[in-house]
Image (spheres, rainbow, N blue to C red):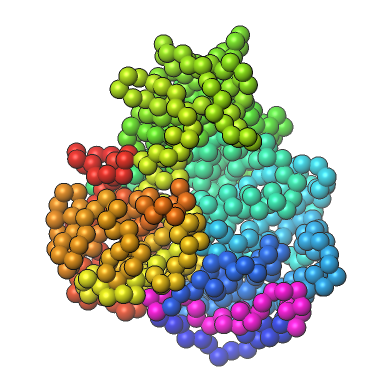
Amino acid sequence: MKSVPQPNSSGFSLSSTIRRARRVVVACGILVSALACTGEHSATADGPAAQQPGGRKPSWISPEESDVLIFEKGARWARRYQQTDGTPPDSPLFARAEGRLAVRAAALAQAQLHNRVPQDLPWARKRGRLVRGYVSEVDGSVQPYGLVIPKGYDPAKPMRLDVVLHGSTRPRGDSELKFIERFDDGDEDSKELVDPPFIELHPLGRVENCYRWAGETDVFETIEDVCGKYNIDRDRIVLRGMSMGASGTWHLGLKHPDRFVALGPYCGYVDTHRFSETPLDTFVRVGPLPEHQELVLHMLDSVDYAANARVVPAIACMGEKDVFFQAHVIMEDAMRREGLEMINLISPGTGHVIDPVTHAEQMRRIGEHAARGIERGPRQLRFVTWTLKYPRCHWLTLERLGRHYQRAEISAHVREDDGVVEVDEPVNVTRFSIAGGALLERNARVRIGKSEFRIEDWREVGEPRRAVFAKGADGWKVVPPEHARHSMGKRPGLTGPIDDAFTTKFVCVRGTGTPWSPQVQKYAEASLRRFAYEWHRYFRGELPVKDDRDITADDVRTSNLILFGDPGSNSYLGKIAARLPIGWNEREVTVAAKIYPAADHVPALICPNPDPAAEEKRYVVVNSGHTFRESELAKLNYLLFPRWGDWAVIRAGETFPQEATEPFADNVLDAGFFNEDWQFIRDRGP
């Protein structure tokens, strides 16, 4: 990866900060010696960055240390990209990060030297605005988030949590430092304290992706981190946001309708095609797409999940003169088709801004729902999804679909008189489960259409009561949950497309052996370099990379493995190649019943890891990072939709750029989806 020259200035210097902080930090166990290597580290084809701060989580980073390292990590990213972004080398943000790193490191050192508990740290006790951090399971990176702790917060009493998603912001090297600046006013109580009946959580969401992919994971990881550090009432978690934050609210709230007590979107888009037609000079219109790209939009476009507003109430707002006004009209029409009435508070005469009066009314209505809390055992449910990436609503979980990216719907209710669970004939569902309070402890009965089933208790000690139903040629039947767990088809946690592999823990595996095809190997190495650069710059972490000979049993067991090379160069790929849904030998590649010369054709794909040593919900990906590129990442977040589906065939060129920042085109000959059994689809529709 190309290095960015460092300026000579008296501004921020990470190495000097580390030297000054070393005395106080070493005493508390933060291995600052590892941070001294903060020049131009990145995961490239020449060396992994798995042990770098901001890369895979080192075992010595504690939750409290992540509160310190957010300043170092944010400054390092800003320093790396300051010339390409035009950031002044002596930016006050650098100096502030330097000071805050030293102050927090010293406070943590003192706390650990005196055996104080983490809750005694100044920022842990603080009321007001502050910034904290956590280490992401996805790539081990340190990620910041903002908090507003009200004056009246009492750690002994559970409190409502409002998750507030930020709007669109151009991704820059200093994005994290600017985000931190919004919330960091020191570690003592803020001078101006507010006292609403809730804590505010502001996730970074990896900056700019509309809370998709790792940005989606970031939201839920920050929620869990805050729930571990503060006394949060999980039945009163609100999700709201403005602009891109509103789009993220629609996206996450309607697809996870049992996670939030209410939604508060303020001016946010809900689909791809029509939003891209907004009459703004900066917008890129998304015209007709290849079939597999059109289909996968059903995973992203929240308008397709409008029916789930019956489960989680949404109080939307929109400015009367907002250029994006049509977005809420689209959602309103979709809800009307589902028999729902959308609440959309329109602010007279305003554009794309938050009107205080309208927002106050939105918050009042949200507060009414939050006061009641989530109804954890609703007697009636109706749930719609288009993918098993979003499979659950309270006590209903969809476990197999007829076809992905087609509408799947299930409706059920618990009869008041005898507790029988009645299920309408599910649409595009071939297996589902019922769990929790919907099943009586004894003599539980479920009726699907005209068939009624008495539920036996197959659960192991400590497991919740659960019944699984599968549809076969003779209709529905009850199957033991253990049988369902061993299904090899697409299921929750293993759905594709390729981009889904980068939303949970993963590691890239670089082949070091002798390749079958030098041309394919060059493509694989260039693809890995490009992915490392794009992940670092736009997803704010070092790409986890290991040589094939260094992969451990724990890597295989717990991580999605992203394999670069061919079965000759990549030993792990060679180990599992015969169990992949493609054919691949030294002469030819067989994909979707088509044969290609192996010398200059590269298969890319995602499927469950066929290695018996891998955990159940782990992928392997071959020769691909994200299937969208910097050309989309640097522009508009609605462009971040999958380009290849579950698989693709690429013709490899003869030469590739050696610099990761230099783009190159993927000559894609074919692409598409696997069917529900991870096999090729004969009619080419999912």
Instruction: Count up the numbered dots.
Output: 0
Query: Bounds of the magenta span?
Result: 23-46
Residue lying farthest bottom? 8
Q: Quadrant of residue 18?
A: bottom right
Which residue appears at 41% of the width and 56% of the height? 636
Vertical position of residue 526 compared to residue 156: above or below:
below
Which residue appears at 50% of the width and 78% of the height? 41
Which residue appears at 78% of the width and 61% of the height? 118
Quarter of the N terminus within the rendering: bottom left
Question: Residue 399, can we see it?
Answer: yes
Vertical position of residue 296 compared to residue 78: above or below:
above
Question: Residue 522, can we see it?
Answer: no
Q: Position of residue 40 (x, y in %)?
A: 50, 81
Quarter of the C terminus within the rendering: top left
Q: Quadrant of residue 90?
A: bottom right
Residue lying farthest right? 114
Q: Is residue 331 left or right of residue 153?
A: left
Vertical position of residue 313 compared to residue 52: above or below:
above
Task: Based on the picture, tell me whether residue 175 belongs to the magenta stretch.
Answer: no
Task: Based on the picture, tell me whether residue 32 belongs to the magenta stretch.
Answer: yes
Vertical position of residue 605 compared to residue 681: above or below:
below
Which residue appears at 56% of the width and 25% of the height? 457
Q: Position of residue 666 (x, y in %)?
A: 25, 64
Q: Position of residue 356 (x, y in %)?
A: 65, 44
Q: Position of residue 411 (x, y in %)?
A: 47, 22
Most common secondary structure along the magenta stretch = loop
